[in-house]
Amino acid sequence: MHFPLRASAVLSFVLASATAATPILFEGQLLDGGLPANGRYDLQIEPYRDPHVGIAVADRLTFEDVEVRVGHFTLTADFARNGDLAAAWWLQVSVRDGDSVGAFSEISPRQKTLATPQVGTCWSTTGDTGTDPALHFLGTQDTQAIEIRTGNSRALRVEPNLRLGTQVITANLLSGSDQNEIFPGVRGATVAGGGLPLGLFDDSGASDPNLVTDHFGTVSGGAGNIAGNAAGTLGDAASATVTGGQSNFALGQLSSVSGGSANQAEGIGSAISGGIDNAASGVGSTVSGGVRNCAGGTSSWAGGANAQVRPSVASNFLNSCSGVPVSGDSNGDEGSFVWGDANGGAFTSTGPNQFLVRADNGLGLNTNNPVSSHVTIGKNDGSSNLLALGFFNNVTRWRIGGVGSGTGAAFEVQSGGDQTLLRVEDASVSARVGISRLPTANALEVEGNASKITAGSWLANSDRRIKTDIASITHALDRILALRPVSFRYTEAYRAAHPAIVDRRYYNVIAQEFAKVFPEAVQSSGERLPGAESDPSASILQLDLHPAFITALAAIQELAARHDLQVTELVRLRAENADLRKIMKRIQQQLDTLFAAAPSAPSQVP
């Protein structure tokens, strides 16, 4: 059930003819509950001379089962009683549902008829036909502006300017608050909407009208926004744009502020995307958003919080570039990029063409899990393997490795000729370091000689408490005697593969011979013979001479023990010899005594 209509319903008519002598075409709009009606309705129309009182000037007409589509309907009426101009009539309209037999409901107030003139002199509220854009238009033919009002306050003003002869070649468009303003003499300007009376705050916190002060400036909406600098000529800050937001100023020529609040784009061609209390004072400078950022240099960029690119001179405005140190040259810190995190302190450039990022919890590239106070670079899928440069407990450090415990992560330092100077890599069960080479088998591998600045060997843990199954070395001298020390030269092919090797005589043992005595001290080096890199059996052997050194100590001890035995035996023999000498001496003495006591024998020679 659509009706009965209440007093708030609206009905209006336009007459297609101005006399009652011929049928009159009525076009109307019917609203049901404030929305365009759809369906079939019964209508009654009765004309009066007065909008409130008096008697009807013609017979009441009833139209049954009138089709209404999207609120629109047409009727043809032929009032038979009065020849007065229909344009002077007030129509009392009553309505009911088309399927109802009840009483009609009057629509209040009465509606004034409008006699439609010839096409081109007035526009129908439901649209005209047969118009020619060259002849039929809304507007003025003189230099006066045209306004559309709502609530009797200006809602839209189109004003001509910059005449070239009789032709207006540009116009200003001013809409929104009736206190929005385009400065006198400014041409090609637009204030599309928004704005509030000066000093009035609404519940959003916005206040003040929108202004365009220079040629071809634009303010699309918001409140308290200004395009232009309101100083100098009307063209020194031309083509500035503020898209919206609150209290944003596009003060430089070709500058723009997209939104946010309290942002100021001062430099020529400068831009601020949004945020709060940002300033772009350099030529072509940009602030992406954030809070209290200053892009002061030519072609500079600032974003985040409290990021500052030094301007060339102190700012003339109270904004985020005010109080920032100046660069001392004409371009500020041109070309500098500064991003500040939200730690609250100012982060300021110190020169031109810098790329500065402050991120207390780490800067990540290809990773979303950076190390705190580090620059972290991950794999391009962000899953593992990272490089981090930064600080740990106030110590500068590089950190290279995997996010997890995977293998293959490595850090490498190379020379200008791509020669490996240092390589540290994860070998799954342990880390390997190569100096001037790629490590293949050992924890530390060196290409060429190695030295240290003090005498003594490399230290190794040898605590009794970390050892088990301890056994003395036996037959050490025999094992040492089984070794064959040799001198030799490296082959030409091997020297070509290792340019650091000098062609001279070297001293060592043969790995294959050494393995017969100390098999556990010989292993593959991870390298293969030059020219046989794909042959597993061509692995170059390397050895650990330490077992021979320790065994040599045992051999010395064996020799010392033998020497001790020999010394003991020699002492014993010397003692025995001394005893024999004493015995011989006593025997000699006894013989001498016997000879002395015996009678003399005849001196006869036998």
Image (spheres, rainbow, N blue to C red):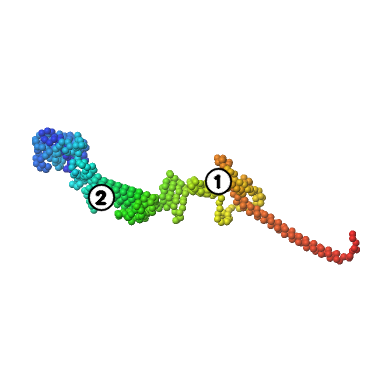
Q: Quick one: which residue is furthest to the top in this view?
A: 22
Q: Position of residue 316 (x, y in %)?
A: 30, 54
Where the N terminus falls, by quadrant?
Answer: top left
SS for tag 2?
loop
For label 1, the residue is 499
Nearer to us of marks 1 and 2 is 2
Query: Image point 32% across, 55% down: which residue?
Result: 314
**Quarter of the image with the C terminus in it:** bottom right
Identify the residue shown where x is 14% and y is 39%.
113
Q: Which residue is under mark 2? A: 233
Indicate the position of residue 462 as horizontal and vertical percent values.
57, 54
> Can residue 279 be seen?
yes
User: Which amino acid does the dot numbered 1 rest on?
Assistant: Pro
Q: Quadrant of residue 580?
A: bottom right
Of 139 and 365, nearer the camera is 139
Tell which circle, 1 or 2, labels the residue nearer the N-terminal end: 2
Of 319 and 230, nearer the camera is: 230
Q: CA distance from mark 1 to mark 2?
A: 75 Å
Which residue: 62% across, 52% down? 549
Relative image position of residue 173 (x, y in whole percent): 23, 45
For label 1, the SS is loop
Number of marks drawn: 2
Residue placed most toward the observer, 283 or 44:
283
Residue 257 is left or right of residue 420, and the answer is: left
Judge from the rendering whether residue 587 lies leftward or rightward of residue 360; answer left or right. right
The disc labelled 2 sits on which kind of residue?
Thr
Residue depicted at 66% across the width and 50% down the height: 481
Mark carried by residue 149:
none
